Image: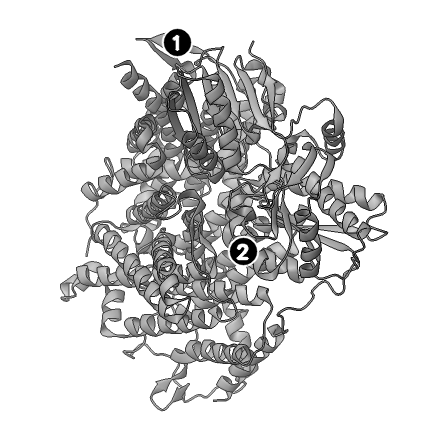
Amino acid sequence: MKKVFALVLVALMTVAMFAGCGGDKNYAAENTEFVIGVSGPLTGSAAIYGTAVKNAAQLAVDEINAAGGLNGIKFKLVAMDDKNDPSLVSGNYSALLEGGMQLSLGTVTTKPGLEYKNLAADDNVFFLTPSASGDDIPSNANGYQMCFADSNQGQVAAKFVNENFKGQTIGAFYQSDSDYSKGIFDQFKKNLDPSVQLKVTSFTEAGATDFGTQIDTLKSCNFIFMPIYYDPASLFMTQAKDLLSPTAVYFGCDGFDGIDSKQGFDINAIPQRVTMLSHFNSKATEGKAKEFIDKYVAKYNTDTLNQFGASAYDCVYALYGAMQQAIANGKEIPVTISASDMCEILKEQFEGGYTLKNAVTGDEIKWEQTGYVNKTAIQYVIKESN
Amino acid sequence: MRLGKIKINHYINYLLIGVLTIVLGSITLAGGKFDNSLLFLLEKMGFNIILAVSLSLVVGFLGELSLGHAGFMCVGAYLGGKVAALLVPSLGNGLITFSIALLAGAAAAAICGVIIGIPALRLRGDYLAIVTLAFGEIVKSLFQNTSDESFGGTLGLETPRFDRNYLFIIAFVLVLITLAVVQNYIRSKHGRAVTAIRDNEIAARATGINVTKYKLLTFILSAAFAGVAGVLYSYSNYRVQSAKFGYNYSIEILVMVVLGGMGNINGSIIAAVLITWLNTWLPTKLTGDLAVLQNLLYALILIVIVIYNNAPGLKGFRDKYNFGALAKKLIMRKVDPSRINDDKAKWDVVPTKISMDEILSVDMKQQEVYTDRKRGGKD
Amino acid sequence: MEEILSTLINGLSLGGIYAMIALGYTMVYGIAKMLNFAHGDVIMVGGYLIYVFMATNNPLLAILLACIGCVILGVCIEKIAYKPLRGASPLAVLITAIGVSYLLQSLAQIVFGSASKMVTVYEFGSVQLLGCTIQVSSLVTLAVTVAVMVALTMFVKYTRMGRAMIAVSEDKSAAQLMGINVDRIIMVTFAIGSALAALAGLFYLLKAPNVFNTMGAMPGIKAFTAAVIGGIGSIPGAMLGGILLGMVESVSYKITAIAPYTDAIEFTILIVILLVRPTGFLGKKRREKV
């Protein structure tokens, strides 16, 4: 019987150890810096996106800190790994919050983001996601997006096609098990003019090796809409370069960005024309984007340079700018402010039409009341046809 | 240790989990609040324990390798979540909705258990393993391609989340129910029939055991509890997303079972708790640039533990230095010479350590004829 | 007609890669009786090695060095992770194999970063046949796979070492009693398996010149499926299963309506085949003895 008591005692002690009472307490009460939290895939097959966001956000934080922070208070970035797995988000989110997070970049990808947005809404934590582009991500008052929402991209692309390809046949190539790709494609199809003939082919992540069959289907198309990320896209282009007409045009969305800086991939060996509709061009030669690219490449390298990072960089500056504006409007932001109070202050700024000017992904970035971003998408020509 | 006719060892897991539930539950009901991180961790531990225990039924006791346990969970999560989402407007997000969702999820998973149980009658070893793996991938792929209105497609199904302050209590009550059902099943005559099939199917058939019935029954039971875990999952997340339920997750559950010791329910529980904790704790410590070390550490821990636990060459080392021996030294200084440490002759004891040669390949013969497969030092 | 033909050719070319990977799986499984879940990741390492050694600008040298690297890696894995578990339950070995798989993936990320790299090993170009374009690299893949299959079969059947392998796979302790060095045989098996993985990595790169740290995972699983369809442990079976799987995948991607379900279709076909033939097409049926 003694043994049983011993075990019960051990169990009770374990419980007592855990039982720090939580609830609505201010976890940031002992902060000496403002803590920015982000959860993203730092390992696994989507690691490149999380790494880009982490690097770029760190770059922005370092710059702000070097310039003196917010009235002398510095910022700190905590990036946690969610492996693009939504079930890890609750653990990450609570660890971030309990670690003193006051500002958040949400998640890098949409799947975990759909979990994150609800958790953050429960605790009233403000987040501005750089790249979780799902339509539902900013559905709560505390969530904002820096990237274009999927449906928006699909509609814009459909508009472009309707204007230029009425009555013609075009091709579409998407990844059926990716929320990003399928989200854009569905909206694109919905908004397409009925006179446009569409040849559709798709692939799954597990089958992203050999696109022979898909290339075969798209053989006769002169315009191919490809709402996919640059990694499979570069593979597709390499395999298709001699099989598709050299005058064909690839038309991608912001996922295409980074294709020309991919290591080992020579985009000039692709005869076809490559264009994309995006808010950032990683081969930009002027303006703020160029500045960002130079700084990023100097610190990290071109490997992880893409629009995810550019958005994250802007996100940090947007949060910083909104805090500055709030202070200018007479608000007080002490370093130990709770995440919830911070959320109220930031919501007020963003709802009040806060504008980020002269940023990397746009000259003037505003946000709708719905949380969607309002900036101009530019059609970049990554490469002209040979 | 005996209390009258009851063996404490059989009930120690109920006791510990029960006490934990009551203590934490009463703190919550008294108005106390725990940190979210603890609540989320407890919820996850809850469904992972159920998964490990139910998989242990198939792998440890029936002796068939299953690599698609997450598939059953997926079915349970989607169906249970859908039922809950439909019922919440009329019945509210309470225990009634939860119970109905639970039954629906478990039933749906059980039906899949029948579907997979039938090939299990015909196939053995790796062939069955690959069929279960295939099942998991099929389920994942099918749910991924559903329409937005039915099961949400690639974005997943939005499901009601239970009040996070109370869900862990329900989770642990479900763990207790699972344990009660599974342990009673194993210790009943049905359970002995199942282990007989595992040890030698032909001999079991010869003694008149209905192999078909017991194999199917075990598969169904295991699948149904995976479905229960799935419903819990759907209730502890705002969304059920099928990408989660790939073979990686099935393997993680299998790791829990193997680490805990095949056919050892308590071991599975401990392994499930440890792995769940490790998976939540590692990302909090290894943030930013260090994140890449997570998988490295996880892999190293896995390899070291498995080699330590299973390597025949380390047997002497293991017998000398292990937690059991250490604990024994600490708790019981004196050994009662009148106690018989051997329970070979007892009917209510199922051998917990088994030779697993048959699981992966039927045609392999016993290799270590000289290994004395002593049942660890159970008192 | 042309469409059908080109779809079949695409399937054949994809099947060649699966067959190559499946050969490695089946080799290790047939002799060592273990599911080497890390096989896909050895392919990944092979891919990275080719990527690194392509700096020499000599494809043949790069492939040779990659093969040697993979053989050393395979033997090391066997010695460190699998050998201590000889005689323990196969499930324990399965779990360490999974551990090794995670280990290789994270090491690759630490060394090479998270961004995938493109590597062009050699451009074979394409030929026209009956109105279809055929990649020469696919023909090379198929030819080499068939050659490897024949060589392996001959090796196992007619050499001393090969016959010793069969003996080990039949009964380890009896083989030991006959004076066969079981440890050495298993080591050689892993060496061959890893060399095959490096070759598979090469053909993968000829088709999809993209190296990243999880590149081996899914092709590995699919090739394992292929090996099971053909009858795991059977060398011609691996070839057959691989080609069949490639065909199914190609046809399924061709039909737009069912394309998203491709993974499900492949696995369903696997289940159906196994229900009809429980040991795959060419798997050995063994009587269970009482």
Report the Cα–Cα distance between label 2 and label 1: 55 Å
Chain identifier of the residue bearing label 2 in the image = A
Residue B262 visible within the image: no
Q: Amino acid at mark 2?
A: Asn
- For residue B61, the mark is none
Q: Where is residue A213 drawn, in percent x and y?
A: 37, 23
Image marks 2 and 1: residues in contact by CB distance under 8 Å = no
Does residue C63 lie above or below B27 as drawn?
Answer: above
Q: Which quadrant would the C terminus of chain C be assigned to in this image?
A: bottom left
Q: What residue would you read off at disc 1?
A: C127
Rendered image quadrant of residue B173: bottom left
Q: Secondary structure at mark 2?
A: helix
Chain identifier of the residue bearing label 1 in the image = C
Residue C137 visible within the image: yes
Q: Secondary structure at mark 1?
A: strand
Rendered image quadrant of residue C168: top left
Q: What residue would you read off at disc 2?
A: A118
